Amino acid sequence: MSATRIDGKQIAKEVRDDIQREISARGAKDVPGLAVILVGEDPASQVYVRNKRKMCEAVGIYAEEYQLPENTSEDKVIKQVESLNQDPKIHGILVQLPLPKQINTRRVLDTVSPDKDVDGFHYMNVGKLVANRPGFVSCTPLGIIALLDRSKIKIEGANAVVVGRSDIVGKPVALLLLHRHATVTLSHSRTRDLAAVCREADILIAAIGKPQFITKDMVKPGATVIDVGINRLPDGRLVGDVDFDPVSEIAGAMTPVPGGVGPMTIAMLLSNTLQSLKFTEKRGR
Ligand code: NDP
């Protein structure tokens, strides 16, 4: 392997250490609080929620967890969110996705107060991101930018190609890169000659959800490759959207899976929760 490995696990730890230091310096009366709502018994979601709680506690964020049964009505989830919107101890509200079928996810997400929307999914925060105004940005895209910054990868002026245009990864990371003055191409399943588009990238971000989709012939020598994908192979192995070993022979720097973007997502959730407390103080409440 010739590419430098971007160690997301280590960088996420550094971010968490910074957050912990800042929270402990603020003293006991200014504690950020995060509430997580989980509806149903999806085992993967239960693991995510447990991890989020553990990480919160480790950095000094107060955490509350609401586990509601699978058959909970939409109105009940909305009432729970509304009650947390009013709770002064809580600065961030996270609704763990996916929600069960009987619940309209968009309606629930848009009930979260935009001031406590630490996942950045509320349409007002999406609008603020488009307009490049302060607000909450979803955690995975923020984590990608933090990985680039902390690895001293220059964004300004770079050709950045994002593969995947989802609302939670592709679109917001493309906007963040644009606001940082990269020249951005946002590509997707209808893009013509994707390999040629990708070969133009100084920074290539793969957020597709297809195992080992980005092959060596799609990567410009020396490029930085950020792999967002998390895919389970039939043999149980976890791989990204990038064909890691061959691509690492040609890339300049790249993230592994696991241990790349994944750990940064939770670190950015903690960061957004602390940021929310600071926004609250600024508003004088
Ligand atoms: P979505 O399924 O919502 O979006 C996938 C995107 O990939 C779509 O825009 C789709 O294009 C595009 N795509 C699919 N096939 C192709 C193709 N053949 N060529 C070009 N583009 C293609 O996925 P997400 O954005 O939610 O997630 C992407 C991956 O990232 C998943 O593996 C997910 O598990 C992982 N993930 C990881 C996180 C982390 O913390 N590390 C957090 C969030 C996600 P089109 O729009 O045209 O259909």
Image: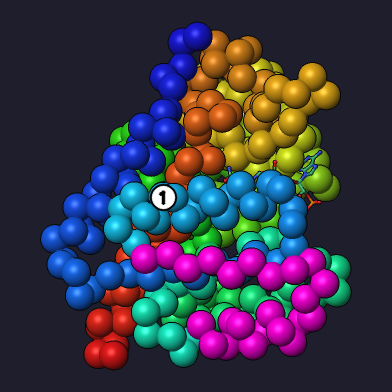
Q: Is residue 126 left or right of residue 186?
A: left
The spot of residue 175 in percent (x, y) is: 52, 59
Instruction: Evaluate whether residue 201 shows in this view.
Output: no
Instruction: Evaluate whether residue 74 shows in this view.
Output: yes
Tell me, yes or no, whether the highlighted magenta stretch contains residue 79: yes
Name the secondary structure under disc 1: helix
Q: Given the current orientation, which residue lies at the most extreme right position?
A: 102
- Mark 1 Cα shell of 10 Å, populated few (<14), some (14-19), many (≥20): some
- Of the pair 50 and 213, the residue shown nearer to us: 50
From this view, report whether residue 233 is shown above or below residue 169: above
Q: How many marks?
A: 1
Tell me, yes or no, whether the highlighted magenta stretch contains residue 40: no
Q: How is the image coloured?
A: rainbow
The spot of residue 107 in percent (x, y) is: 72, 81
Q: Quadrant of residue 63?
A: bottom left
Q: Quadrant of residue 252?
A: top left
Label 1 residue near ligand 1, CB within 8 Å: no
Q: Which residues are magenta?
A: 62-84
- Of the pair 148 and 218, the residue shown nearer to us: 148
User: Which image quarter holds the C terminus?
Assistant: bottom left
From this view, report whether residue 21 is shown above or below residue 263: below
Q: Is residue 163 left or right of residue 172?
A: right
The spot of residue 274 in percent (x, y) is: 33, 65
Residue at 70%, 22% (x, y): give it. Answer: 237
The spot of residue 73 in percent (x, y) is: 79, 80
Residue at 46%, 10% (x, y): give it. Answer: 2
> Which residue was labeled with disc 1?
55
Residue type (three-letter) at the residue carrying disc 1: Met
From this view, report whether residue 22 is shown above or below residue 104: above
Residue at 28%, 70% (x, y): give it. Answer: 31
